[in-house]
Structure formats: C-alpha cells, structure tokens
Image (cartoon, rainbow, N blue to C red):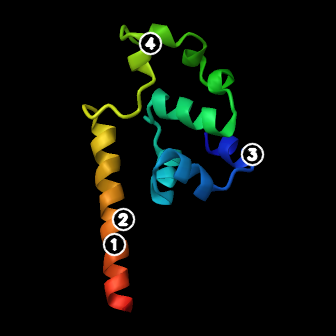
Amino acid sequence: MERAVRQSGMPLTQLTQKLGRSRRWIYNAFENPYLSLEVILQIGGIIHHDFSEEITELKNPRQLTNEPAERMYSVTDENTVEFWKNKYLLLLEKYNELLEKVRMG
C-alpha cells in the first residue's frame, strides 16, 4: 500500500486530511500487516488505485464476509479495535500538540 500511495504523488498530509487521520497513523498503517480491507479500499479510492491486483481477496470481497455490502465498506464501525486504537492515537496527538503550545507560549 505504501508504494501505491507514494507513486500516486499525493502528499501524505493531503491523504491524512482526507482520511481524517494523522501522519503518524498513516505511517503505522504502512507497517501494519493486518490493516483492514476497509481502510485499504478507502485509501485506494482517495489515491485512485485499484488494490485488487495486489490483494486477490479484493477481486470478490463478498467472499470475505457474510455482512451486507453496505456494512462491509464502513470504516466508522465503533465496535472494532482499530477504530478505538486510532481514536486514542488521534486524541493523544492532539493532547501532545496542546502540551507543546503551552510549553511554547
């Protein structure tokens, strides 16, 4: 995924803004071998890249789950560990930014 993102020419800052995530999150995603297909599909849509050539499961995503199609592509499912981990990381980054502002000002 990292190669596709970098080859797209889209700056990481722009990508993370469109995802509503932080730069740290995208770097962690690049290293995460268990990144959800939902997130990969979302990134592919943003950078206009079809990951089905690299990830054969994407050729027929209905094989991966018995869930209805509309739920399969949801990336805001609050019942996932990834959702809460990412929410925690985002809040931690905001907290650190506030601490930095207090120290500087």
CB of mark 4 within 8 Å of CB of mark 1?
no
The residue carrying pointer 1 sits among few (fewer than 14), some (14 to 19) or many (20 or more) residues within 10 Å by Cα, namely few
Residue labelled with disc 2: 93
Residue at x 27% of width, y 35% of height: 78
First-in-chain label (4 vs 2): 4
Looking at this view, is 13 or 51 the one in front? 13
Classify mark 3: helix, strand or loop.
helix
Residue at x 45% of width, y 23% of height: 73
Amino acid beneath label 1: Asn
Rendering coords of residue 72 (x, y %): 42, 19
In the image, is 25 to the left or to the right of 14?
Answer: left
How far is the residue under mark 2 from the one under mark 1? 5 Å
Rendering coords of residue 40 (x, y %): 53, 33
Instruction: Please tell me whether residue 6 is drawn above or below residue 48 in the rendered image.
Output: below
Residue labelled with disc 3: 7
How far is the residue under mark 4 from the one under mark 2? 33 Å
CB of mark 2 within 8 Å of CB of mark 1?
yes
Looking at this view, is 98 or 62 the one in front? 98
First-in-chain label (4 vs 3): 3
Classify mark 4: helix, strand or loop.
helix
Classify mark 2: helix, strand or loop.
helix
Residue labelled with disc 1: 96
Instruction: Please tell me whether residue 54 is drawn above or below residue 3 in the rendered image.
Output: above
First-in-chain label (4 vs 1): 4
CB of mark 2 within 8 Å of CB of mark 3?
no
How far is the residue under mark 1 from the one under mark 3? 31 Å
